[in-house]
Image (tube, rainbow, N blue to C red):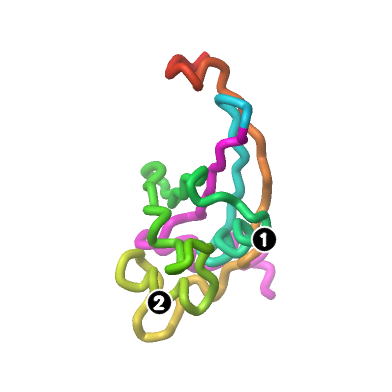
Amino acid sequence: MSILRNVLGPKSKYDHRLPYTYEARLAVTGVPGMTESYVSDTLCGLLERLAAEKADPAEATILEIRPEGEVPILVEHCLAADGSWLRRPEACRSFEARYAGHEKSGRCCYRDRSRESDGPFVEYVPGAANGKPG
């Protein structure tokens, strides 16, 4: 790995068609206003983590993180017919028609990124349960 790549990160991070990263936010059961977040440079890596954590899809919000802001991803696009989180290569096939970088050519634009994820990061927004943050 070159020094330049270590400093600047993967080349795909500079492709403006692609999200910078992905985030999943999960409501913490029984604690109104509290969420756990997981982040990953790839959507498939994020789904692998959600599956490993046995995250409930009904409690999840998935977002593309872009310089211009957060863009929601429909959770149903991330689920298999049985309701489980998609895994590669099925996830790739599901995403190729909907999300940039998941190319039909079989050449993933994210191949230079890590599929590892970080988290959970916990956030609590007081009053969020009644629609009045803070």
Q: Is residue 9 left or right of residue 110?
A: right
Question: What residue sits 67% from the left and 73% below the top?
Answer: 2
Q: Nearer the viewer, residue 38 or 81?
A: 81
Neighbor class of circle 1 (other Cα within 10 Å; few <14, some 14-19, many 20+) is few
- Residue at the disc numbered 1: 52
List x then y, in percent, for residue 113: 58, 68
* Count of numbered badges drawn on the protein: 2
Neighbor class of circle 2 (other Cα within 10 Å; few <14, some 14-19, many 20+) is some
Measured in 3D between alpha carbons, the distance from the residue under mark 1 to the one under mark 2, in whole angstroms, is 21 Å
Query: Which stretch is magenta?
Result: 1-29
> In terms of sequence position, does the residue under pointer 1 or pointer 2 come before the other?
1
| Secondary structure of residue under mark 2 | helix
Mark 1 and 2 residues: CB-CB less than 8 Å, in contact?
no
Name the residue type under label 2. Answer: Arg
Q: Nearer the viewer, residue 78 or 7?
A: 78
Residue positioned most to the left? 97
Mark number, residue 41:
none
Considering only vertical position in the picture, is 12 above or below 72? below
Q: Nearer the viewer, residue 15 or 127?
A: 127
- Residue at the disc numbered 2: 93
List x then y, in percent, for residue 120: 68, 44
Question: What residue sits 60% from the left and 56% below the top?
Answer: 50
Q: Can I make out residue 96 in this image?
A: yes
Give the label, 1 or 2, closer to the camera: 1
**Image quarter in which the N terminus is found:** bottom right
Q: Is residue 126 magenta?
A: no
Residue positioned most to the front? 82
List x then y, in percent, for residue 28: 61, 35
